[in-house]
Image (tube, rainbow, N blue to C red):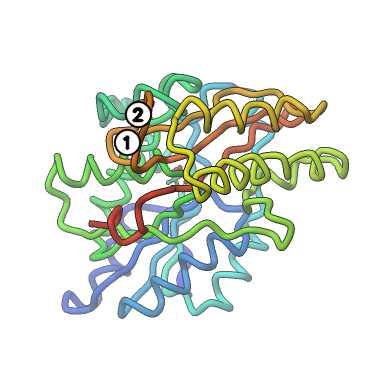
Amino acid sequence: MQVVKTVEEVRAARWTDPYLTWGLVPTMGTLHEGHLSLVRRARAENDRVAVSVFVNPIQFNRREDLDAYPRQLDHDLGLLEAEGVDLVWAPDEDQMYPSGFQTYVSVEEITQPLEGASRPGHFRGVTTVVAKLFNVIEPKHAYFGQKDAQQVAVIKQMVRDLGFNLAVVVCPIVREPDGLALSSRNLLLSLDERQAGLVLSRALNAARDEWMGGQRDAEHLRATMRAIVEAEPLARIDYISAADPITLRELEGSTDHALLSMAVFVGSVRLIDNLIVGYGEADLRA
Ligand code: PAF
């Protein structure tokens, strides 16, 4: 496994044989089973696998959040080596954003609600760094987790709009046995907060149960989730949503599909989770 820092080193490693296919897994490090599920899928579907490890400062809108974001590169490299990864790009900030950097990629409409409303500038940071990763590595497939449902929709939009020559592959959310969606941020939770964090999946599952029982009213589904989260003393709602899975617009009245999602502060840690009702995963991949 080659571990490199600069764009030139990535290109030299990437183009040893132009006929090999590359899969890319973009990450911010502090890897968990969710990331490794993407790496394994990439390993199975490509000749070569590249993983980027970069805590992207321009996608954080709160300095405290960036400073608190966990970092453990040596541990990450051990995990990636064991998965048979070929190339790791772990740039320093000045390689990703050299002095004088002034080019940003911005997706418009679908970045406005949900995460975009709560974290102004977040998606501009994500699409800028992901566009650069795509340009430098030129993968055939790029792997992202469904846990960041809006990120997936935004990146697919960017790929369509700018004609990137690659396929975005979306992999299912990986959960702890008790339902907590895996996230690098889980490391920041105290034991009590870890327990309280279960309220996200509990609320989503309750809304899904209502859906299965025939409930189709979007406001009703939101109210169900809200009531469950509000009953948890350590939790504070950022948003609770039942939105169209493609446009991400909030649904009103009766619906035949929905992306149920939420962002909730548990203590000072902001957790997100989601699930889709009414669409199979294959519909969304199309
Ligand atoms: O999902 C993440 O970890 C990040 O948003 C990404 C895609 C690696 C860009 O920094």
Give me the residue at 52% from left, 28% from top. Answer: 220
Helix, strand or loop at label 1? It is helix
Quadrant housing the C terminus = bottom left
Give me the residue at 68% from left, 54% from top. Answer: 179
Q: Where residue 120 is drawn, which disc sits there? A: none
Which quadrant of the view contains residue 129?
A: top left
Q: Which residue is mark 1?
A: 128
Residue 149 at x, y percent in the picture: 42, 44
In terms of depth relative to the viewer, which is nearer, 110 or 276? 276
| Ligand 1 quarter of the rendering | top left
Q: Where residue 124 is drawn, which disc sits there? A: 2
Label 1 C-beta lies within 8 Å of the nearest ligand 1 atom: no
Label 2 C-beta lies within 8 Å of the nearest ligand 1 atom: no
Kind of residue sitting beneath label 1: Thr
Which quadrant of the view contains residue 12?
A: bottom left
In terms of depth relative to the viewer, which is nearer, 218 or 125? 218
- In the picture, measured across the screen, residue 166 lies left or right of residue 281, that is left
Answer few, some or many: residues within 10 Å of disc 2's Cα (few below 14, many 20 plus, some between 14 and 19): many
- Above or below, 8 against 266 in this view is below
- Above or below, 47 against 171 in this view is below
Q: What distance separates the C-alpha of mark 2 from that of mark 1?
A: 6 Å
Dot 2 and dot 1 residues touching (CB under 8 Å): yes
Kind of residue sitting beneath label 2: Arg
Helix, strand or loop at label 2? It is helix
